[in-house]
Amino acid sequence: MKTFIYLYSETKAPSDNSGRKKTVRVWRVVKNKPVWVGERTETYCSEYELVMNCLQYHKALPAEAFERVPPSNTRKYKSEASLREAGIADLHSL
């Protein structure tokens, strides 16, 4: 099972009301040392969704971690706990 740590931050909403910029920076823990994975910035999404989007963009997890369930098209693994229980990944916030 892969272990990841991430740092989540939000910036103040700009004056044009385009929404808060949410940023996540992700590292993978390999032999007790952090290895940079990547960074992602978006608006209008949850913290968990942003982390998953970052991991998917950087291809840090297998495709099964990002499966969607029809007909609602929601993620199969909807939380950090469900990913951990499936033995795919362990996510920790800093």
Image (tube, helix red, strand yellow):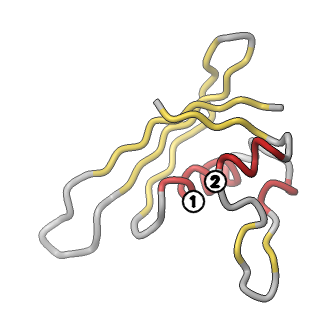
x and y, in percent, of residue 37 in the image: 63, 34
Quarter of the image with the N terminus in it: top right
Q: Residue at x 56, y 36 (%)?
A: 26
Q: Residue at x 79, y 88 (%)?
A: 71
Question: Which quadrant of the structure image shows residue 34?
Answer: top right
x and y, in percent, of residue 22 in the image: 38, 55
Label 1 with label 2: CB-CB less than 8 Å: yes
Residue 49, label in figure: 1
Q: How many marks?
A: 2
Question: Which quadrant of the structure image shows residue 35?
Answer: top right
* Towards the viewer: 82 or 49: 82
Give the residue type that dot 2 points to. Answer: Met
Residue at mark 2: 52
Which secondary structure, mark 2? helix
Q: Residue at x 76, y 39 (%)?
A: 89
Which secondary structure, mark 1? helix
